[in-house]
Image (cartoon, rainbow, N blue to C red):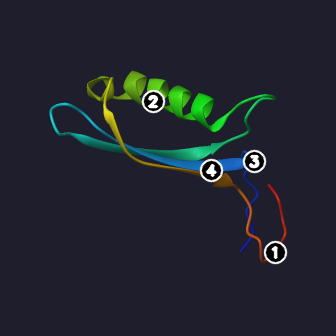
Amino acid sequence: MQNSNRQGSHMYVLTLQSQQQNVCTISGTFTPGAGFTRWDILAQLRVDAARQYPSMEGGAVLYFAMEENYLAETGVAP
């Protein structure tokens, strides 16, 4: 299988739960800027999720994962 789509250097999954008990999961790839921390990225993802799904503003984080976007077996980076 070949992937010709350009992807970011990291992938993420974020699940939020609103105060009304609604749950939302977002995922994707990105390349962080110089000096970014995991906290910076989580904070920005929460803002992005609230823009797309307004009920998620101030929601509780149920799950957050962020990893480099490559498979160790192949050693191929995006």
Q: CA distance from mark 4 to mark 2?
A: 15 Å
**Is 74 left or right of 17, judged from the image as shown?**
right
Rendered location of residue 5, percent (x, y): 72, 52
Q: Which residue is mark 3?
A: 9
Comes first in the chain, label 3 or label 2:
3
Q: What residue lies at 81% left-to-right and 29% top-to-bottom?
A: 34
Q: Residues within 10 Å of mark 3 (few under 14, many from 20)?
A: some
Q: CA distance from mark 4 to mark 3?
A: 7 Å
Comes first in the chain, label 1 or label 4:
4
- Check disc 2 and report its element: helix, strand or loop: helix
Comes first in the chain, label 1 or label 3:
3
Comes first in the chain, label 4 or label 2:
4
Q: Amino acid at mark 3?
A: Ser
Q: Which residue is mark 1?
A: 74
- Check disc 1 and report its element: helix, strand or loop: loop
Query: In the rendered image of this protein, does residue 31 appear above or below residue 40?
Result: below
Q: Residues within 10 Å of mark 1 (few under 14, many from 20)?
A: few
**Viewer-nearest of discs 1 and 2:** 2
Q: Which residue is mark 4?
A: 11
**Is 65 left or right of 20, judged from the image as shown?**
right
Rendered location of residue 38, percent (x, y): 62, 38
Q: Residues within 10 Å of mark 2 (few under 14, many from 20)?
A: many
Instruction: Specify the label residue 47 is tagged with.
Output: none
Q: CA distance from mark 3 to mark 2?
A: 19 Å
Query: In the rendered image of this protein, does residue 68 appear above or below residue 47?
Result: below
Q: Which residue is mark 2?
A: 46
- Check disc 3 and report its element: helix, strand or loop: loop
Quadrant including the C terminus = bottom right
Q: CA distance from mark 1 to mark 4?
A: 17 Å
